[in-house]
Every structure is written in C-alpha cells, then in structure tokens.
Image (cartoon, rainbow, N blue to C red):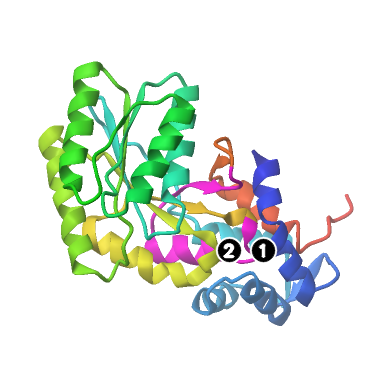
Amino acid sequence: MFGFIKKSLSKTAEAIKSVVPKKKISFSKDEIETILLEADVEYALVEIILNEIYQSKVTRDILRSKLLATLAESTYKEPEFTAPFVELIVGVNGAGKTTTISKLAARYKNDGKKVILGAGDTFRAAAIEQLSLWAKKLDIPIIASKQGHDSSAVAYDTIDSAKSKGFDNVIIDTAGRLHTQTNLANELKKIHRICDKAHSGAPHRTILIIDGTQGNSAIAQAKAFNEMIGIDGIIITKLDGTAKGGSIFSIAYALRLPILYVGTGEQPENLTPFDKYEFVDGLLDAIFVEEES
C-alpha cells in the first residue's frame, strides 16, 4: 500500500525538488513555506501551520505533527445499516467517477461481496455505456436505462433489485454537470429521497470524487456538493498524475471530511485506502534526509 502512495507522490516530490534541490535534516520556516506552497498546500493553511511552529528550525518530527493535525478528521466510521449498503457517487464530469466506481466494485467483489451498479448518470449516453462496459468486464450486474430517463428511477430500481436478490453492495452513479447548476442540485436531492424510499436510511454513504490534478481549486466545488446533499467521504483521483499532492491537506482541513481512498493508477486495483500516516511520511521523505541514529 505504501508503495502505491509514495509512487503517487513522485510528481509532487519533483516539484519540491525544484525549489529545494537538496534534502536536509531541518529547514527554516521560510523554506518550509516555499516547499508547502510548491506542493499546492493552500496559502492560508500554510500560514496556520507556520504560526503554530515556534522553533527557528523545522525538523521532520515538528512538521509531521502539524501536517497530521490538518488530517485530524480524516477517520471514517461506517454507519449502522441493514444490507444492502448503498453508496451514491457524485462529482463533476471528468473527475473520474465511472472509473472509480469500477474500482470500488472490483474491491468489494474481491472481498466476496455481491455488488450491483446503477447507471444513474442518464444525462450522458457515454456515461451509461462506459459504466456498462466496466460492469461486463468485471462480471457485475448493472441497472441502466436510456439517456434522458429519470435517474432517480434508476436508483430505485437498482436498490429494489439488490434487496430482492440479496446483494451486499449497491453503487449508484450520478450526473456530473457543473455544481453551479440548480437542476443538478435538485436532481441529486431527489435521488437521495428516492434512495431512502427504496431502502430506509439509504444512501448510507455519499462519496464525492475529486480530480487530484485540480488541486486547491477543487475545494469550492466540494463545498458546493456538500451543501447540496451532504458528503460523507472523499475519493481523490489521478494523484499519480499531479504535482499538487499537498492539496489533500487543504481539502481535508477545509471540508472536515474523511478521505476514503486515493486513485493511484488506471487499473481496478489502483484504488488505495487513504492512510494519513503513510501519506504524510511519503511527502516528508521528499523533503528531509534521514537523521543518523
């Protein structure tokens, strides 16, 4: 697991190296500011971190404690539920929703769970086709309709089918139009209501997919989705393709929401559970030289 996370931070490490070519045992606060900004940690959060450091020289242990504090609320506690466990996947187009759904489905299936998908993004025909192809590849059933059909009806039918056939997990895709559109907000709220009607308490988890290459610009987007329907957790995709790995600290700190997984590649197995200790240590390895024992 750690190998995947550290590898996914390689571009962020390269960005840090461009401003601090040589790793050291300690840095000045000005140097740490430069490093964190280069890694795309939001300026306001960098200032908060530095204001809580009273030493003139910043060591690995000092910075580690401050970075971990920004991820203090990244722990997720699964709610009580009656099977099937229903998850609603939201996010803008291009964030990697469909691919992430396939990765989640593959993960559950490998754990011995019976999984069914719901192609609730009826706004785009391509989304239905793409998810259907993944379902076929993974040999997982899917409930799908045609473009333009009622997405909440797809959600209801998927849950209803899962209940009648004894499925463990339901994963429902949703439209990914820009979060500023009122019709998307209304649609998502309706899907939430219909899920609860189909199965009391559903959706049990609403996950927001964030494109890691967007860095801190994803924060406003995430806040908007959270205000619409309430987000239970975040999955950050394309972390392996960005030098903005530090934005995870800003996103977690700003939203006070747990990061569940990070996408570290294109294959179904490239969905890594987020571990804040491994993530922070992976970043610090790019900054500090190991102290001699």
Q: What kind of residue is marked 2?
A: Lys
Answer whether residue 150 is magenta in the image: no
Identity of the residue furthest to the left in this view: 197
Residue 248, disc? none
* Residue drawn at the location 45% of the way across and 38% of the way down: 102
> On the picture, is 152 further left or further right than 96?
left
Q: Most extreme residue toward the right, as rendered?
A: 292
The disc label shown at residue 66, or none: 2
Residue extent of the magenta highlight = 241-266
Residue lying at 46% horizontally and 72% vertically, measured from the top left: 217
Q: Closer to the camera, 93 or 144?
A: 144
Question: Mark 1 falls on what kind of element?
Answer: helix
Residue to which mark 1 is pinned: 62
Q: Residues within 10 Å of mark 2 (few under 14, many from 20)?
A: some
Q: Nearer the viewer, residue 214 or 45?
A: 214
Q: Does 172 sit left or right of 132 as displayed?
A: left
Residue 21: % across, % down:
84, 72
Q: Position of residue 98 (x, y in %)?
A: 42, 46
Instruction: Give coordinates of residue 216: x percent, y percent.
Output: 49, 71
Q: Residues within 10 Å of mark 1 (few under 14, many from 20)?
A: some
Q: Residue furthest bottom?
A: 30
Residue 60 percent location from the top left of the image: 72, 61
Q: Horizontally, is 183 left or right of 279 in the view?
A: left
Q: Residue at x 29, y 49 (%)?
A: 121
Magenta stretch contains residue 250: yes
